[in-house]
Image: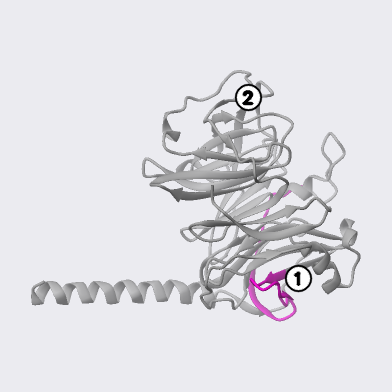
Amino acid sequence: MTGNLRTAAIWLLAVTVLAAGAVAAEYSSSLKAGKADLKSAGALAFGPEGILFVGDTAGAAIFALDTGDRKAGAAGAVDIKGINEKVAALLGAAADQVMINDMVVNPISRKTYLSVSRGRGPDATPVILRVDGSGKIEEVALENVKHSRVSLPNSPDAAAKDARGQNRRQEAITDLAFVDGRVFVAGLSNEEFASNLRSIPFPFQDADRGASIEIFHGAHGRFETNAPIRTFVPYQIKKEAHILAAYTCTPLVKLSVASLKPGSKVAGTTIAELGNRNRPLDMIVYSKGGVDYILMNNSSRGVMKLSTEKIDTYQAITSQTEVTGVPYETIAELKDVQQLDLFDKANAMILVRSGAGSLDLKTVALP
């Protein structure tokens, strides 16, 4: 490398490092110490610098919490039996009075975070817990933590019910992801086309109305605008940013991120029907042998593995159908997986129901 090129390279590296530091500082400086007054704790997602995003459906808000968990951790096998019973003991409650709502792994420390309800119903206390590889469980303090909050302006009213008598506010936030300086939020709004997907810039200022999502539901044989996305992953298709979203009964839909304009009505492209009488729970993307795969756990159809290799070639499903579109493989050895997240390049973290009825937290090799 010549002297001029070397100087230019060093300058470019310095600018890149300073820019990264400036962005991190901007994220951190947007958080202020105080009580994070969560009304509930549901969907979780990690952002940069150990910042944890928490969906608060009861409060119709997203919180960003500074966990302070920024020390790199070595990946190692985890196998914690009866994590639900250990959580209940820590919180001084009976096991049947504790609900683990979501689970996510901090990609820096490899520690696992749980959103928990202590108690049942509207008076349940929200709790965030951190679990290390040895099985040590500790509560993430919410009384004096650096945090920020953004309200979702058009969430369902707290008393609103659906046709089955279920509280619609409980589905105001069904899943979260942080990508390229934005928090993507799936759930329901109070609008006529209730299925909603928002893209909220972080650091938080205000959240807009989000985009209303319409899909064709293959198993039901109709267009739907009121069914919320249950789980989703961001994914690049032909260098264009997309959301791959799964719905109950179980359409897999692709949505262009560029189309998600505030207040717009967006038609998703249904590229697979994965079977009815089923609710998708979590999705992750990983690479193996030079191919990207989606892994998705479900309420009644086990854990599915789907290749993304030809995902751009599947035609839109526009008529009633059974299982079709992007093919999948069921991973026979993974049963009763309640929660799923990526642990490292070779392993997933799962929360799995054991034969005795308890919940175990452990790492498993990616199939």
Residue drawn at the location 65% of the way across and 37% of the way down: 247
Instruction: Examine the structure image and report whether residue 152 is included in the region drawn in magenta.
Output: yes
How far apart are the two marked residues, 2 and 1, measured between alpha carbons? 41 Å
Give the residue type at disc 1: Asp
Dot 1 corresponds to which residue? 37
Task: Specify the segment rendered in magenta.
Answer: 129-156
Percent x, y for residue 313? 42, 29
Dot 1: element: loop
Q: How many marks?
A: 2
Left or right of residue 230: residue 2: left
Dot 2 corresponds to which residue? 218
Instruction: Indicate whether 243 appears above or below 58.
Output: above
Question: Which of disc 1 and disc 2 is earlier in sequence?
Answer: 1
**Quadrant (top left/top right/bottom left/bottom right) for the N terminus:** bottom left
Instruction: Indicate whether 300 appears above or below 218.
Output: below
For this rendering, which residue is in front, 152 or 301? 301
Give the residue type at disc 2: Gly
Other residues around mark 1 within 10 Å, as few (<14) / some (14–19) / many (≥20): few
Q: How did the renderer colour the structure?
A: one colour
For this rendering, which residue is in front, 305 or 27? 305
* Residue at the extreme left: 2
Percent x, y for residue 316? 51, 25
